[in-house]
Image: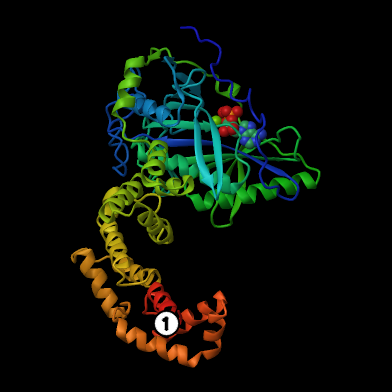
Amino acid sequence: MSQTQPTVNPFAQMQAGRPTGPLVLGYEVIIGFETHTQLTTQSKIFSRASTAFGAEPNTQASAVDFALPGALPVMNKGAVQRAIEFGLAVNAHIAESSVFARKNYFYPDLPKGYQISQFEIPVVQGGTVEFFLGDEKKSVRLVRAHLEEDAGKSLHEDFVGMSGIDLNRAGTPLLEIVTEPDMRSSAEAVAYAKELHKIVTWIGICDGNMQEGSFRCDANVSVRKPGAELGTRREIKNLNSFRFMQQAIDYEVRWQIEQIEDGKTIQQATVLFDPDTGETRAMRTKEDAADYRYFPDPDLPPLVISREWVEETRAAMKELPRAMAARFRSQHGLSEHDAAQLTCSWGIAADYEDAAKLSSEPKLAANWYINAVLPALNSSDALPEISVYELTSTKAPAKIAALISRISDNTISNKAARQVFELLWSRNTVDAEPIAQVDALIEQLGLKQMSDTSELEKIIDDVLAANAKNVEEVRAGNAKAMNALVGQAMKATKGKANPAQVNELLKKKLA
Ligand code: ADP
Ligand code: MG
């Protein structure tokens, strides 16, 4: 089998016209990501052993995973299927024909002595990941995404003076997603990682469980003076939480700048982040691709992906985040930024649409999701792992629709509704109907707006009598004085009047 020239040259177009990010002590920060996503197949990438997490050591490994002599790998179609789905989700090219290669290295958890991966012709080529960083729209280019097998695990804890090997994880299918060095700050890197996490969980190719290692990011970090050549990078391995990711990159950037300012040079290296000290530490000097002696795996024929397969896959996929955001803009009249926020996960997006439908107020529902529901979920750390089921069980759409209906029929003010929301959300009562819950809370908190006009008129008369000077000014055409009167009346009703109604009554009386 012959291999052609690489179809993707990762760095040919690198840096062309990329905007610069915020400088740190006069240095530009450059970040590129390699993310290992574990695919959601039932069985391994080249064997029929199960991929389920947490089994007794070595109970989920077959002859292929143990690398018994003569055992041959057989490609799992489901893994390829998921790679195609990812490629379509990021507008990448799906290779017509792609090749598996042996990446040779020695490690106890890799009994074959090589990892089956892809080198020169990956299955997914190019593509982009787009997201908002605050109000700014960012686009990170992908170099490639390739299929490979995971290695086993060395177990050190349970053995005194010895280490054990668990091959349950060996052969678990991974899609490694590699970016161009396009990111310019730790905040942008985290926003990219969150977006990528959203995409892979949205389309269901990865469960996104970061604690269990289903989504592991390696951050390649370098610094340079603006306009200079790219600096030497160090690779922070296995970042499995968004918080650590930001801390690790921030620490690494400061460390590299210090070294350079001290006149030292940066050595290319692989480093680990220690959450306890908040520092990164070199683990080994980095191998180059040449050190791995990559060559095509003679046990596996080239992977041929027909265009029909790609198109069938495209047709069967659920609405993608980008398409859904575009639809929210045209159908519900939302801004690009709001639509992006509401499509932060499949669960949130589906939930928001339910609330929009139930309330018939898509814009108000969007405001409630963005300003109340998302912050509440964020503060409880539920995002972005939240699933449709977890959200549905909180009845959030019906609760939001109930709140909106009580604002629309003037029972409560917007401000009062926020108070009701806090309790409604934290109590998470699932047995009572949301509208009944909302009404009970309005009663309990005494938030009902004053609807009795005669009572309100009396209060307003008192306010007018007590504020003769303001009344005079309003009659002289001073709009500010009117606001002062509205404020006085609201105060006198302890905020329970409807401000619009107060305004109207005042105007009538002063006309
Ligand atoms: P390898 O395969 O040896 O790890 P690659 O050249 O494929 O290295 O690059 C790996 C990752 O490092 C890519 O995500 C790329 O964007 C990033 N990268 C390359 N050069 C730099 C650099 N100077 N600074 C930061 N990141 C970089
Ligand atoms: Mg790499």
**Residue located beneath label 1 in the image:** 509
Q: Residue at x 31, y 62 (%)?
A: 404
Residue 6 in view here: yes
User: In the rendering, at what x and y percent does residue 220 appear?
Assistant: 60, 38
Q: Secondary structure at mark 1?
A: helix
Give the residue at the far top of this rendering.
Answer: 1
Q: How is the protein colored in the picture?
A: rainbow
Q: Report ligand 1 position as a quadrant.
A: top right
Residue 74 in view here: no
Q: Amino acid at mark 1?
A: Lys
Which quarter of the rendering shows the C terminus? bottom left
Q: Is residue 122 above or below residue 448?
A: above
The quarter of the displayed image where residue 47 is located = top left
> Mark 1 CB in 8 Å range of ligand 1?
no
Q: Nearer the viewer, residue 307 or 446?
A: 446
User: In the rendering, at what x and y percent does residue 263 appear?
Assistant: 81, 43
User: In the rendering, at what x and y percent does residue 250 appear?
Assistant: 62, 50
Q: Nearer the viewer, residue 499 or 222?
A: 499
Q: Is residue 128 above or below residue 494?
A: above
User: In the rendering, at what x and y percent does residue 424 appear?
Assistant: 30, 68
Q: Nearer the viewer, residue 447 or 490?
A: 490
Q: Label 1 crowding class (10 Å Cα cut-off): few <14, some 14-19, many 20+?
A: few
The quarter of the displayed image where residue 305 is located = top left
Q: Residue at x 79, y 47 (%)?
A: 261
